Image (cartoon, rainbow, N blue to C red):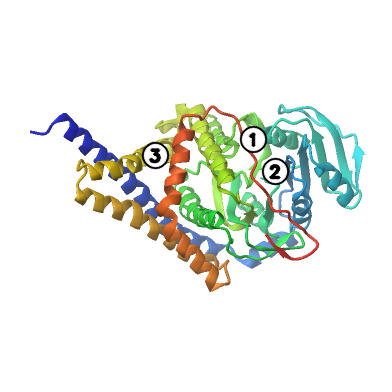
Amino acid sequence: MIGITDLIVLFFQALVLAYFLILNGTYTIFILLSFWEIKRYFFVVTQHDVQTLLSCNYYRPLSIIVPAYNEESIICANVKNLLSLKYPKYEVIVVNDGSTDGAIGKLIDNFRLVEVKKPIRRVLKHKPIRKMYVSLDYPNLLVIDKNNGGKTDSLNAGINASSYPLFCSIDADSLLDKEGLLRTGRLFVENKKVIATGGIVRVLNGSNIQDGGVSHIRAPKKIVELFQAVEYTRGFLSGRTAWNYFGSLLILSGTFAVFRKDLVMAVGGYRDTVGEDMDLVVRLHKYCKENDIPYKIIFAPDPVCHTQVPTDLKSLLRQRNRWHRGLIDSLFYSREMFFRSKYGSVGLFGFPYFLFVEGLGPIVEFLGYLAFIPFLLLGILSWQFALLFFIIAILWGMWINIGSVLLDDVLYKRYKSLKDMLKLCLFGFFEMLGYRQLIALDRFIATFAFRKKGWGKPKRHKIEFNSERQI
């Protein structure tokens, strides 16, 4: 007769196995779907289409908003990059969020800024603006110096000050490809239902920078950066594209995304949360569904934004903790969407997946890792279960990583060096042997602290835009 302890152990085994089956099975299906979807997308989109858009008047002007706090080492390179983008008509709005370093001085000196008085229609709430500047050399550059209020507060200030119907949010530590705006802007032209879109985010660390742009994509050198390069490749290849296919995309990276301004204002702009990117997308879904507004929120696989990732373990864990707190907080805030047919595939499929697999999954994963070795040594778990667990959780995860890297190379061919590709494949193989468990522990802790508002700031590499160098 099976005792209570045996039933608990059996339930625990089934729960852990089910989690890893669902997780790895979903990743596998998503990668296959993504491969098909991206090939279909690139069949439709050609270089000729982009050049046609650039040469005609059939476009929508756009405002780029760059929130910046203590970004003295990188802000000038970022602005230089943005001012050199290919797009018929756009403005760059840098929002200095009460920085205590010399960022505002660097901007004044490098772009010949002069103070102006510009009236702003304050639709969204934000901290008081101290000064506003325009450039004598770049008429489409506006710099706002305001009291510190955080990233979401800065974005809201930028939206209020913006002049155009579309706005693009981009992090100060990121560099956008020259045609990135064209490739996202064309989506709003081709389909009037599109209200938000975002592109692929790649790891900047290790690449060569020249004239404020990426001249040569290279794999990072540090171990912690290489693991993140693998994660970014897997996440954007398997996650964003597949959810786009199902019409249930719940997140556009805050590193780079484009939105329709009127609808963002209608939902109250950015909410004060550490997961502002996902939170805004979820609330846009909710608002459009509740008000019967035809809409599309889509992911575009061809615009590329390169971003600096944490270079040390402490900064990485702080970032991942914030990401997971933001995910839980966003889902909790819009919890009435959960499994409601009123919200279509977002409520029935996207929301439950992100809640159970991405949100609460780390609890199952961490407890599975924690109990695995002692249970095995005490004979509570069978060797057959241990072998099955190893195959599903470890080997399957390794090959998903390697498959993502190889598929990414087939589709995009971003890395020119075979050595770089082999490095990424190698770290995709080893991710499941320590790194994955550490991230799971951090996300486990974050699950119970989602109300915490702290952001934390990772270390940055200084970016020069006058000469070529490696980041």
- In the rendered image, residue 237, in percent from the top left (x then y), is placed at 49, 56
Q: What residue is drawn where x is 83% and y is 47%?
A: 141
Give residue 389's position: percent from left, percent from top: 28, 50
The residue wearing badge 1 is: 264
In the image, 432 versus 190, the foreground residue is: 432
Distance from disc 1 to disc 3, alpha carbons, whole Å, reads 30 Å
Circles 1 and 2: CB distance less than 8 Å? yes
Question: Marks 2/3: CA distance?
Answer: 34 Å
Quarter that holds the C terminus: bottom right
162 left or right of 50 in image:
right
Residue beneath label 3, please? Answer: 361
Residue at image location 87% in from the left, 49% down from the top? 139
SS at circle 3: helix
Amino acid type indicated by mark 2: Phe
Q: Amino acid at mark 1?
A: Val
Residue 218, numbered label: none
Q: At 85% from the left edge and 32% from the top edge, which residue is drawn?
A: 119
For the question of whether residue 4 can be seen, the reply is yes
Near mark 2 (Cα within 10 A), the count class, few <14, some 14-19 or many ≥20, is: many
- Front in this rendered view, residue 328 or 463: 463
Label 2 element class:
strand
Nearer the observer: mark 2 or 3; the answer is 3
- Local crowd at mark 1 within 10 Å, few (<14), some, or many (≥20)? many
Q: Rounded to the nearest whole Å, what is the CA distance between mark 1 and mark 2? A: 10 Å
Look at the numbered discs 1 and 3 and tell me whether their residues touch, using CB distance below 8 Å.
Answer: no
Nearer to us of marks 1 and 3 is 3
Nearer-N-terminus badge (2/3): 2
Q: Earlier in the sequence, mark 1 or mark 2?
A: 2
Q: Earlier in the sequence, mark 1 or mark 3?
A: 1
Image quadrant occupied by the N terminus? top left
Q: Amino acid at mark 3?
A: Gly
Q: Which residue is mark 2?
A: 167
